[in-house]
Image (cartoon, rainbow, N blue to C red):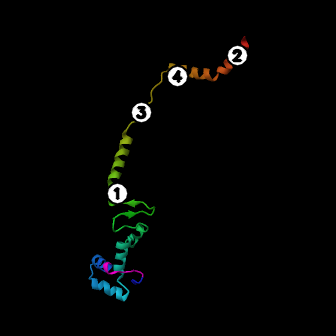
Amino acid sequence: MLINDIWLTRPMIGDIAATTGCHPRTVERWIRQGKMPDIVYKLLQITENGKLELIHPDWHGWPICARSGTLRTPAGETVHPGDILAIHYRKRLLAHLQTKIRSTKPPEAVAVPKQTRQSVGREVSASTNSGRSNYRQRREL
């Protein structure tokens, strides 16, 4: 892989050597020749630029920050390692709560005595027909 698009400084040579497990002189040779092995280039793209799509295409758009260890979603949200570890526990909690909701009986309907239903019905019909009954009463007089 050509490395003419990568600007390398002396401290970076040590970092690259440490990341790849190569001797610093090997890294310097790659720079002089202007190329490095493809696997080393991919490793540096993953570790330095967080390009996880080089590992698997499904991770395209999910960069990882080498400094903070955070993962950024395509929507721009930042996910910490603890958030990923918590997924398992959140799933278990959700399953527990769903089971609890399913096992909870709905409140039983309260039976209203027939008398009460009739009196309520009369009150409602009296209030809705109050205008008509007043008219009839006046007319009969």
Mark 3 falls on what kind of element?
Answer: loop
Which badge, 2 or 3, is on the more N-terminal residue? 3
Q: CA distance from mark 4 to mark 1?
A: 55 Å
| Residue underneath mark 3 | 107
Q: Quadrant of residue 128?
A: top right
Q: Position of residue 124 (x, y in %)?
A: 58, 23
Q: Is residue 90 above or below residue 107?
A: below
Mark 1 falls on what kind of element?
Answer: helix
Q: Position of residue 78 (x, y in %)?
A: 39, 60
| Residue underneath mark 1 | 83
Give the label, 2 or 4, closer to the camera.
2
Quarter of the picture containing the N terminus is: bottom left
Mark 4 falls on what kind of element?
Answer: helix
Q: CA distance from mark 2 to mark 4?
A: 26 Å
Which badge, 3 or 1, is on the more N-terminal residue? 1
| Residue underneath mark 2 | 136
The kind of residue on which mark 2 rests is Arg
53 in magenta: no
| Residue underneath mark 4 | 117
- Depth check: give the residue in front, 42 or 24: 24
Magenta segment boundaries in residue numbering? 5-11
Q: Position of residue 99 (x, y in %)?
A: 36, 44
Q: Residue at x 34, y 72 (%)?
A: 47
- Depth check: give the residue in front, 102 or 44: 44
Quarter of the picture containing the C terminus is: top right
Which badge, 1 or 2, is on the more N-terminal residue? 1
Q: Is residue 95 above or below residue 109?
A: below
The crowd level at tag 2 (other Cα within 10 Å; few <14, some 14-19, many 20+) is few
Q: What residue occupies the far bottom of the structure in this picture?
A: 33
